[in-house]
Amino acid sequence: TAEVMSHVSVHFGKALQECREESGLTEEMMEEFHHFWREDFEVVHRELGCAIICMSTKLSLLDDNTRMHHDNMDEYVKSFPAGEVLSKRMVEMIHTCEKKYDDIADDCERVVKIAACFKADCQAAGIAPEMAMLEVVMEKY
Ligand code: BOM
């Protein structure tokens, strides 16, 4: 399942190039998207939240309220090899994190909190991709 997550992450991360400018996410804040999963990478910058919104919007993964579009996220994850083993769980995990921070009005600020929560929950569940896995998958996209 960490394997599936690595495919989703690498594909999702491709959209970062198109979103860097409008999100204001500098290379200092995040060099490459897959560094998101490094143990020593802290998911804290508001700009990263803005970038995730921009990237998710390009993939139609958000609704009009800047919340996850459940059906589209499910379909997106299912589009990767063995995606069906992860999709439902991933939608649930993200939604659990969304609910925790629903009172934060600033979209970028809220989404970076959700992303940090999602990363921590994936690590706790043992489904966070390892860097070596990501490097291998990156050659495929
Ligand atoms: O309420 C808006 C929710 C947006 C949630 C996005 C969470 C994902 C954080 C970034 C991690 C990416 C890894 C894989 C791709 C997920 C789409």
Image (cartoon, rainbow, N blue to C red):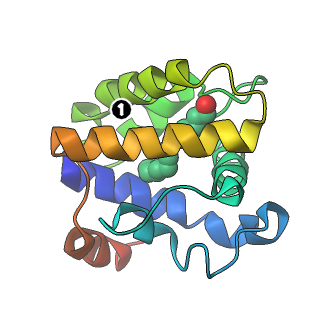
Q: Residue at x 63, y 51 (%)?
A: 52
Counting from the top left corner in percent of width and height, residue 11 is at: 47, 60
The answer to whether residue 81 shows anywhere in this view is: no
Viewer-proximal residue, 79 or 106? 106
Quadrant assignment for the N terminus: top left
Seen at 59% across and 28% down, the residue is 68
132 shown above or below 53? below
Circle 1 crowding by C-alpha within 10 Å: few under 14, some 14–19, many from 20: some
Quadrant of the image containing the C terminus: bottom left
Compared to 113, does 98 lie above or below? above
Ligand 1 within 8 Å of disc 1? The answer is yes
Outermost right residue:
22
Q: How many marks?
A: 1
SS of the residue under disc 1: helix
Q: Looking at the image, can residue 122 be seen?
A: yes
**Residue 94 in the image: x percent, y percent?**
45, 30
Q: Is residue 84 above or below residue 79?
A: above
**Mark 1 highlights which residue?**
90
Q: How far from the left and from the top, in percent, is residue 110?
A: 65, 36
Q: Residue 140: x percent and y percent? A: 35, 74
Residue occupying image coordinates x 30% and y 78%: 135
Q: Nearer the viewer, residue 73 or 123?
A: 123
In this rendering, position of residue 106 left or right of residue 80? right
Which amino acid, mark 1? Answer: Met
Q: Is residue 33 above or below residue 3?
A: below
Residue found 73% across the figure and 70% down from its top: 20
Q: Quadrant of residue 92?
A: top left
